[in-house]
Amino acid sequence: MKNTTEYQQKKILVLGLAKSGVAAANLLHKLGAEVTVNDRLPIEENEAGKALQEVGIKVICGGHPIEILDDHFDVIVKNPGIPYNNPLVLKALDKEIPIITEIELGYHVSEADFIGITGSNGKTTTTTLLFDILKQGKKQPLIAGNIGTVACEVAQTASSENLIVTELSSFQLMGIEEFRPKIAILLNIFDAHIDYHGSRKNYVNAKGQLFKNQTEEDYCILNADDEEVLSLGDSNKAKKVLFSTKQVLKEGTYIKDNCIYYNQDNVLSLKDIALPGKHNLENIMAALSAAKILGVDNETIRDVLHVFTGVKHRLQYVETIAGRKFYNDSKATNILATKKAITAFAKPVILLAGGLDRGNEFDELIPELKNVKTLITFGQTASKLERAAKLAGIESIQHVDNVEHAVNIAYELSIAGDVVLLSPACASWDQYKTFEERGDMFIDAVHKLK
């Protein structure tokens, strides 16, 4: 860890706990900052808050009182989940207090270079796949970010020999000032998190933050099939590496004769890829591009892709019971992800979908719903999904209370050879704390069927 004096003797407010807030508070305390933590959960119920108090950190719990800002903080480290329209955050912005996320903090203490991966869909798969390839290629990678391991925690143990492969959300990227990835990957941009950002333009600009500090010594990997992605990379000083599933490129990563090429070099055949779904080709090509930049040989890439079948909650194969195949795609929290999940299967599927209502309809999903034989809905968006299903001509529609009930009904309505797919097209927060909790309920319910 770098012996930085960036935060020494500064008054810093850590706003919101969870894993990232706890890690940030402990690190700042270690770096000699005067830390105050503020979390909405009352101290009586807040085990993390109590633990921070025990090491001498000031903790204010039970809400976000605006008066806390009277303490004249130099910096706020904000939990990414807290929106910028929160009254305390708005007041801090009015006072021109810098607001960062813990990824910025991690960058300041890290001896290792970062690889930053973002996009509306495919971040987790690409991050995990690239980590596996680099590990197999003996590049000493570490994994961090939105994937579940806190970057500022990982950075403390990283050396200059490591690479930190980091999944980054738009929420995290809004809170960077100097963060500079050696390799930046932008997979795609679709409508997502508009309720948080306020507009699509703000969301796109947040994604573009990934590139803002890159120099000629860095690389940015861009999806050549997405004009918005290309436009964000236009002003970037980094060396551009493009990938495309639709075009044969002069340079970069592309498909030709059912093989993936990198700069005219045939890396592997599509038939050697274990990961299902055409949409995953973008994720594979992005990860492959980064691996080639870092000098990983083709044999290593082939070996990993021959066995890599994805990550938990992202088109995860769970079990085959009485000829029915069950797949958990709980991480599909938007329409695009569900569209891609449905089209990953050649045969009609039994789709389990629903969740938090963010105000949108599901008309965009109608073309793919024609490949659904039965729709089973739950959560706040059930009626909206049922409306779209009727427009798509689906006759078999069922409404249930939760995912567990949906699994049982799906089994009863299915026959041998069917695919039962949980791909909600919605966030989980109306019924479940996380998409992981929702996916785990699905997995448990499938196993109970045995």
Image (cartoon, rainbow, N blue to C red):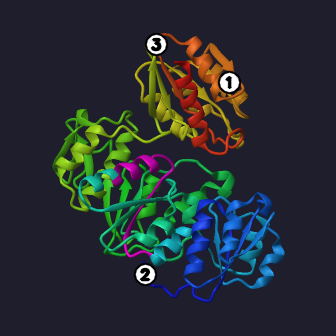
Residue 137 vertical position relative to residue 27 in the rendered view, above or below: above
Residue 386's disc is: 1
Read off the residue under disc 2. 2
Identify residue type, mark 3.
Ala
**Which residues are the magenta region?**
110-131
For the point 56% across and 36% down, the residue is 439
Along the line of sight, the residue nearer the viewer: 139 or 378: 139
Whether residue 14 is visible: no
Read off the residue under disc 3. 322
For the point 47% across and 40% down, the residue is 312
- Quadrant in which residue 17 is drawn: bottom right
Along the line of sight, the residue nearer the viewer: 351 or 318: 318
Magenta stretch: includes residue 124: yes
The x, y position of residue 149, in whole percent, is 50, 58
Q: Earlier in the sequence, mark 2 or mark 1?
A: 2
Magenta stretch: includes residue 308: no
User: Does the CB distance between marks 3 and 1 fall below 8 Å?
Assistant: no
Q: CA distance from mark 2 to mark 1?
A: 54 Å
Identify residue type, mark 1.
Glu
